[in-house]
Image (spheres, rainbow, N blue to C red):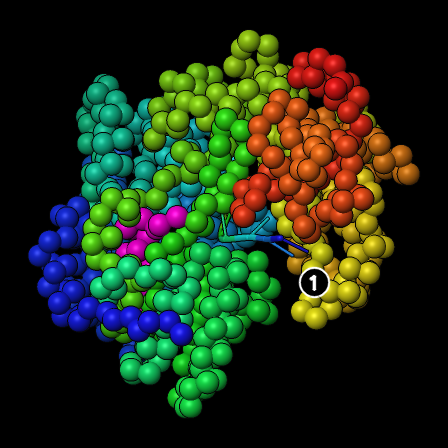
Amino acid sequence: MTAKRSYQEPTTTVSRRENDFPSNDDGFIRSYYNRSSSVANDTANKASTIEEQRCQLPAFSHKKQLLYAIEKHSVVIVVGEPGSGKSTQLPQYLYEAGWSANGKTIGCTQPRRIAAAMLAQRVSEEMGVELGTTVGYSVRFSDAFNPETTRIKYLTDGTLIRECLADPLLSAYSVIMVDEAQDRSIATDMLLALLKKILRKRKNDLRVVISSASLDAERFRAYFDSNDVAATTTTAETPTLGSATILSISGRLFPVDVHYLTTPCENYLTASVEAVMNIHTHEPAGDILVFLPGKDDIAQALADTHELAQNNDGLGSMMLVPLSAGLSQEEQRQVFDPMPAGKRKVVFSTNVAETSVTIDGIVYVVDCGFVKQRVFDSVTGIDKLVTQPISRSSAVQRAGRAGRTQPGKVYRLYTYEAFKSGLFSPHDVPEVCRLSLAPMVLTLMALGVNNLVRFDYFQPPPPELLSHALEQLASLGALEPQRAVLTPDFGIYLAELPLDPKLGACLLNAAQKFHCLREALAAVGMLAIGSDPFVVPNGQRAEAELDKRDFMVQEGDVLTFVNALVAYQETPAKLRSQWCRLHFLSSRILEQADRVSRQLEGYLIRMGYSRERCRQSCGQDFSRLQKCLTSGLFANAAKLEVDGSYRLFRGGPALWVHPSSVLFPETAKPKFVVFAEAMETTKLYMRGITAIDSTWLAEVAPHYYSEAK
DNA sequence: TCCTTCCAG
């Protein structure tokens, strides 16, 4: 039994918050409380027309202001909370005001594919046009637009960056709105920098709208203000434009009461279960959303809550649901199912529910205060998965999930003092400061950015990450010797491929040297997805493992995955999901990998490789495929140690075979391997392992390995 | 003895 935990009285919390929150985030937090809920909500207005609903959105009252700002400034930064209508309305206002009258397009980027598609759907309905005509979208693997007629186009920031490769000035667009810029993904940061560069060349005919949910707007303005946009010639026809200006749009969130622990908890898992039980026994109806760092935590919390609920009479009226990315559509659906009267839904979720997935009807949020984040170590070249305290903006975002449809409450499983202390940084560390930059550097170079150190980044990345990326690209043969220029026979093709450069190199080498594209496309498709297609259903471990033997080969995981994907691709489409169930394979993962490998085949064909070349198989000569994988992954070559771990040739920490690997049993361990990725979780694990012959290293990467060891 | 989340014509 765990000790009872007490929460501060909400009233005390509120008054303390207003008195001594640091002014920096004070405004943000308090804005939840001071929001007048005078704006009627959608359910109360079922009868109102689309046009009436549009007029009720907070964005509507700022329409004139926005249009004026965009007339006079080349960059407008819009700060708007969820529900303000900025993503749906702003592009429409611009369209109505004639910004696309010259045959140009108003683009609006989103960090996520689903958001782009859904917004396009919504806006086409509001405008009464068919999706794909005046309003369209374009994301990877799916689009609906017509270059002739589409005037409002939603796309992912990655797609727009790809469009830059073909049209460096983005001349098809008159306005580009970068939505959700607070996301700070590598793609968003890159896009901001590219747009700043483009603005210098398109002083008067391009407008940029940056929209962000955080109050960090000043930073965006400072960045764009340093652009020399207005400092050039001014004539009557081209009056001087102010550079960047800021506009605020209030949101439609309801007040959320914040509760902190009075004493720190030792274990966020037990604390979160207690919080759920407390809410369930003491609070009125309303669903609960619990934020936890990982899937394991979710499963454990769910089991614990289930047990506690069963042991307490009358508490069985809860419906417990897990939520994380990677669940099937079917599994995700029950998160959205409305509850019958008297039943309370409790969703245990990872970060997906913070931005990607929005669940209606959440009244209570339990926030454990932690998140798992990927961090890349440029010294070892190893990714880590680190559980760490969330940022304050993340805490605000999580809290906001309780106030979408009615006033709510958030229970933070940490103390107010801790929240106020340096433990919670104001913002998340942006991706450019914590991930491998090789893909970004490759794209920037393809766009003609040659001086990567002096490039005008939105936020300059750490030098060691940049030099690691340059070294990696050079070692793969993508750069001219001693020069930061892409090689014409390899580097520029590598930049075309939507892949990590290591995997792209495997693919190009398969086409150019090893003639095994059939399998290489499958291997790279699987590795790009990064998931294990073999599933182990509860209680069927033995059967699943037995069946996996049909695909398993001693050469390792990648070739085993290739066997599974090739077999999947040879199964008639109609039978595939049944075939997957029979063989304990995930049809979702194989379908994704198949889609990626078919898209990559399309790229190769456009590069001039024939369809026959793309279908060329290594047959039973697996060593060709193994060499091909070695040719891209040679920097991740490791040799077996006596304790069963592996070590990189250049030294470094002990690397372990993941228990899910076909090479996990002691007897299966080859002397030498290459792996696709190393990731530190509970231990430092290799992923996507392939057995190799050590003599191949000097053969495929002589510059890296002088001789076999 | 086990992996957070996104994304790329």
Question: Residue A70 is drawn in which quadrant?
Answer: top left
Depth check: give the residue in front, A363 or A577.
A363
Q: Quadrant of the N terminus of chain A?
A: bottom left
Q: Is residue A565 visible?
A: yes
Which residue is at a point 74% across and 19% down the rendered structure image? A709
In the rendered image, residue A257, in percent from the top left (x then y), is placed at 22, 68
Q: Is residue A131 left or right of residue A508?
A: left
Residue furthest to the top in view is A482
Depth check: give the residue in front, A305 or A227.
A305
Question: Residue A633 is drawn in which quadrant?
Answer: top right
Residue at label 1? A536
Chain that bears disc 1: A
In the rendered image, residue A167, in percent from the top left (x then y), is placed at 49, 30
For the residue marked with disc 1, what is the amino acid? Answer: Val
Asked if the stretch drawn in magenta spans residue A398, the answer is yes
Residue furthest to the bottom in view is A314
Question: Residue A68 is drawn in which quadrant?
Answer: top left
Element under label 1? loop
In the rendered image, residue A180, in percent from the top left (x then y), is placed at 36, 48
Asked if the stretch drawn in magenta spans residue A37, the answer is no
* Vertical position of residue A100 compared to residue A345: above or below: above
* Vertical position of residue A100 compared to residue A73: above or below: below
Q: Is residue A142 left or right of residue A202?
A: right
Q: Is residue A466 left or right of residue A512?
A: left
Which residue is at a point 66% across and 46% down the rendered structure image? A658
Q: Residues within 10 Å of mark 1 (few under 14, many from 20)?
A: some
Residue furthest to the right in view is A620
First to last magenta residue range? A388-402
